[in-house]
Amino acid sequence: MRTASFLLLAGGSLLAGCTANEPAPAPTPVAQKVGSCEALNGLALKDGKVDAATSLAGGAMVNLEAGKPGLPAPAAFCRVQATLSPVPGSSIKVEVWLPERAGWNGKLLGAGNGGFGANMLLPSLLMRGAVQKGYASVGTDMGHVSEADVDASWALNAPEKIRDYGWRANHVGAETAKQVIAAFYENPLAASYFHGCSDGGRQALTLAQRYPADYDAIIAGAPAMPWTRMASAFANNAVAANKPGGDLSMAKLKLLQSASLGQCDGLDGVKDGVIDDPRACHFDPAKLACKGGEDADCLTPGEVATAKLFYEGAKSADGKSFYPGFAPGAEAEAGTWSQWLTGKTSQHVKFGTAFFRYFVHANPEWQLSDFNLERDYALAKTRVGGDLDADRTDLGAFYKRGGKLILYHGWNDAGIPAQNTVDYYERLVAANPKAASTSVRLFMVPGMSHCLAGPGPNNFDPLAALDGWRQGGPAPERIIATKYDNDLFAYIGLPAKAGRTRPLCAFPKVAKWDSKGSTDDAASFTCEAPGK
């Protein structure tokens, strides 16, 4: 769920400030050899029809949502908008963006949504970059429209909308994109990929597990899975964080971050404000416990308990781990703990409440104060786990087709714990070691927050790595990441100043400094086994 924590709250205001000043490049002529873009209007589709097909020149503003800032088109393309109704009670909005024929690279990129979906804003950011690279691209609203990606009221007593969101929307979106591509281009589709982060990462894994023929290769970032267990952990965190005396103020978050970085920042040989591999950092917040009364420079018993829960993760009644906790080192960074974990309006409060109200209990009056981890998780698993959870490891059909899977996750993520993706990768390897070694790679990103941003280099190109791999090249073992002065601008292809670079290493390897070159230059690092 790449949510308000970065793109909607931060991104919305940033975009509003940048697009009006962006110079529009000269429109690129659109080669029309098989009929115009507008000729796609009304095209009959398997599950619906094309509502609108519009030619957009490079630099034209693409308006995605009423009242939200648009973005300049990165190149000329045909914007196709359709409505699909695969079953009664289902209404899925789909957009397919088609680069001009002369610039199409013959490939398709499916773009995942985030949070509870609800509009085309988040997919469009990936789609924009795809069109810029010559890809056709497709995204959906996940089968419903709402004001915010934390709103789940649409799911109340709506099983078909839950199925659209859980697994159907991206599948029929892929079918639609392929039908539209066949109608518009002279040449056949050469390859199809999917990329999503957060809930988009869950969507990516859902496609690999349920519909292995939809896409040839898949990128899943910070996957929100398994949904029912994750949402239960969100609710558990929210309840604990708001117990009397348990909330962590920004001052206490800064205290925790200073102490965790002080203990572990230099473990990789480089002091740069980033804990490169937090698994090697055994930070105990109890070391900050107040010796006497409450003080600004120490933690009360309630604050220690909350911090321990966040680091260690939720535990079931028997004391066993229920869901992983969060890595140390980013407690006070923007868009991390204060956005996701602490306070009465945290993202975990919002998502946990919305999920159990509308998906599970079908009761808009349900409150977090009624939450019980074991009872409510079991109920969620029974009622919607089959539609939402995407943690299966049986990817045999996907592997058999030559499918490739790249996983990634930022260690500073305070929305979905990075260890969850490590655990899933290790289960994939255990389930089928040979296939995983040739078909799956995991890249952990030091210093990256939820899907993007953070103090570490966090802009990288998994699509180029995936494409080269799927087209017959070697499996990626190293991807270069860059830190920009504005990470969001860089992510969506707007001007930004590049700074530090680092290699991201295929797990379990980590970047090791050569002790000679600049620590701001990826060339000074090699990928080595941890502890070497």
Image (tube, helix red, strand yellow):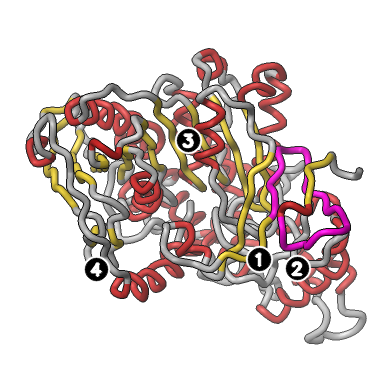
Are circles 2 and 3 on residues that touch, CB within 8 Å?
Answer: no
Are circles 1 and 3 on residues that touch, CB within 8 Å?
Answer: no
Q: Is residue 35 left or right of residue 94?
A: left
> Is 67 drawn above or below residue 144 in the view shown?
below
Q: Is residue 313 left or right of residue 461?
A: right
User: Which comes sooner in the sequence, label 1 or label 2?
Assistant: 2
Residue beneath disc 3: 204
Are circles 1 and 2 on residues that touch, CB within 8 Å?
Answer: yes
Q: Is residue 228 left or right of residue 152?
A: right
Residue beneath disc 1: 455
Quadrant, the C terminus: top right
Mark 2: secondary structure: loop
Residue 21 percent location from the top left of the image: 31, 75
Residue 465 percent location from the top left of the image: 56, 37
User: Residue 273 — which label?
Assistant: 2
Report how far apart the C-alphas of labels 2 and 4 lie in the structure: 38 Å
Residue 199 percent location from the top left of the image: 48, 45
The residue shown at (30%, 46%) is 141
Residue beneath disc 4: 67
User: Which comes sooner in the sequence, label 4 or label 1?
Assistant: 4
Q: Nearer the viewer, residue 447 or 383?
A: 447
Report how far apart the C-alphas of labels 4 and 1 lie in the structure: 31 Å
